[in-house]
Amino acid sequence: MVSGDDVLFCTESFYEGSRDRLAAVAPGLEAVLLRDGRDVSDDECARITLGTFTADAWPERAAAFMKVALQSPNLRWFHTMSAGTDAPVFKMFLDQGVTLTNSPGSSAAPIAATVITYLEMLARDMPRLSRAQADRRWDWFRWNELIGGRVGVVGWGPIGREVARLAEAHGMSPVVIRRAARGDEGYPVRRLHDLAAAVHDCDAVVLALPLNEATRGLVTADVFRAMPRGAFFVNIGRGEVVDEGALGEALRSGHLGGAGLDVFATEPLPAGDPVWDLPNVIVTPHNSGSTDGTGTRADEIFFENLRRWVEGAELAHVVGK
């Protein structure tokens, strides 16, 4: 619970916008602020016991924020606005004995909406239409509807569930692909352990898996070969889950009809990466969930946990628990 010695590390903009709420939830809580153009001193670092990494710090000030937090020897609890915690910095917090919490589900709605946008754009071959518009060409052609198609949703967290809901609303038939069925999915379930067999009849495959040792390199050339010719592939999970060379080959050969890619093994995606030049690919800069609403929902999760901290209750969404 908050004591007279507890000090929160946060950005200046978050603090100014949340000062009254912080005072209401945790009376007496002091703050050390990350301010533009001003370093946080060693004495200030020593005072920090709590930290919240908010959306206003991403991506420009992320490195500076994490540096201060990691250099705070008395940090006890650190909350991150992100759902994913596979970045090495989060392991560093855990190795230091810091309690780490995250914000699962806060970005699920916009990410799922982005997935459907990719699929609708790929079905209409919007990359081709964009090139035609840039060239002032009237490029008429007929496109295929998504209605009636089968979409394999790989991963059944908040994002996967929202993708399935929206896909069904757009006339598609979702298939859940996860380690084991629990009986409450509401859709047919196939086993993740044989991903190639699971996607053999999917008109689109959406990858919504976290990165861990079990998922790294999971999507191989065999998986892409198993997908029907002309199928679409979407990755809003992590780039390292996919054999990107095999994906590029499947797209260049025409076996895959197109892809919507928001995540890559190397980010930012290097300017010389051949995926930039593929005519059937939509590339976005890992921002499928970067909306004002995402930050607001993540803040709500932090404030609920802060209330628990004050009351001495168990924190929610503890990473590694």
Image: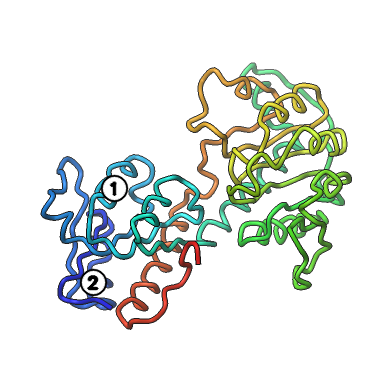
User: Helix, strand, or loop for circle 1?
Assistant: helix
**Residue drawn 34% across the image and 61% down it:** 98
The disc labelled 1 sits on which kind of residue? Phe
Q: Say whether marks 2 and 1 touch (CB < 8 Å).
A: no
* Count of numbered labels shown in the rendering: 2
**Label 1: which residue?**
65
Q: Where's residue 312, x and y in %?
A: 33, 81
**Residue drawn 60% across the image and 38% down it:** 240
Frontmost residue, 77 versus 305: 77
Residue 122 falls in which quadrant of the image?
top right
Picture disc at residue 224? none
**Does 45 appear above or below 88?**
below
Picture disc at residue 20? 2
187 lies left or right of 133: right
Residue 52 falls in which quadrant of the image?
bottom left
**Residue drawn 15% across the image and 44% down it:** 39
Render colour scheme: rainbow
**Residue drawn 67% across the image and 30% down it:** 281
23 lies left or right of 312: left
Q: Where's residue 21, x and y in %?
A: 28, 72
Q: CA distance from mark 2 to mark 1?
A: 23 Å
Frontmost residue, 194 versus 145: 194
User: Helix, strand, or loop for circle 2?
Assistant: helix
Frontmost residue, 272 versus 171: 272
**Does 72 appear above or below 216?**
below
Q: Where's residue 273, x and y in %?
A: 57, 21
